[in-house]
Amino acid sequence: MRATTARIDVTLWVAAGVCVAVTLWLSLVTVPPGHMAFQDADKVEHAIAYLVTTLLVLLAAVWRPGGGNGPLARWWWAVLLAMVAAGALVEIVQSYVGRDAELADWIAEIVAVALAWAVFVVVRKAFEHA
């Protein structure tokens, strides 16, 4: 059981780290594939990136399926604030790297962080009652 929990922890941390890196890369270095494939496609891209990244960070740091509370269990709110702040910072930095910094992108990110929190709560309750 302990080895399985360790594998889950490592997998969640690696997946969260990869998501953070890919999100930063697509936000600051290159234009994402399919960018502007339809009106406001970039808002959808921002939302997906922040939803998946936030959910993985919550699962790695706050509570792990089968592993219980994580190292930031009491700091769940700080994880959410950090993701919102990171989104704001990325939007600001984008204006210096030849990308468009948009308030609407940040709003999409905030909505995605809130949705990730809601999904996290549902998943956690489902596992705890199973």
Image: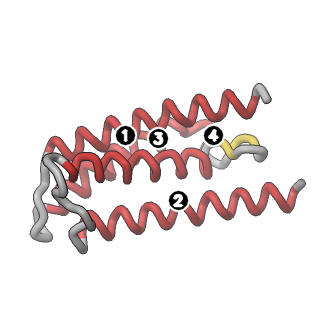
Residue under pointer 4: 73
* Element at label 1: helix
Q: Is residue 65 left or right of residue 20?
A: right
Residue at the spot x=78%, y=44% of the render? 66
- Are the residues flagged by discs 3 and 2 in contact, CB closer than 8 Å? no
Q: Nearer the viewer, mark 1 or mark 3?
A: 1
Q: Tell me whether circle 1 and circle 4 mark residues in contact (CB < 8 Å).
A: no
Q: Quadrant of residue 80?
A: top left
**Nearer-N-terminus badge (1/3):** 3
- 99 vs 75: above or below: below
Specify few, some or many for label 4: CA neighbours under 10 Å numbering under 14, 14-19, or 20 or more. Answer: some
110, above or below 48, in the image: above
Q: Please state which amino acid type lies under the numbered disc 3.
A: Ala
Q: CA distance from mark 3 to mark 2?
A: 16 Å
Name which residue lies at 66% across and 33% down. Answer: 124
Please state which amino acid type lies under the numbered disc 2: Ala
Q: Secondary structure at mark 4?
A: helix
Disc on the earlier residue, 1 or 4: 4
Task: Identify the mark at residue 78; answer none if there is no mark.
Answer: 3
User: For the N terminus, which image quadrant?
Assistant: bottom right
Mark 3 Cα-neighbour bin, 10 Å: few <14, some 14–19, many ≥20: few
Q: Earlier in the sequence, mark 3 or mark 2?
A: 2
| Earlier-in-chain disc, 4 versus 3 | 4
Secondary structure found at label 3 = helix
Which residue does the numbered mark 2 point to in the structure image? 16
As drawn, the label of residue 112 is 1
Relative side of 33 to 23, left or right = left
The residue positioned 21% from the left and 69% from the top of the image is 31
* Residue 83 sits above or below residue 32 on the image: above
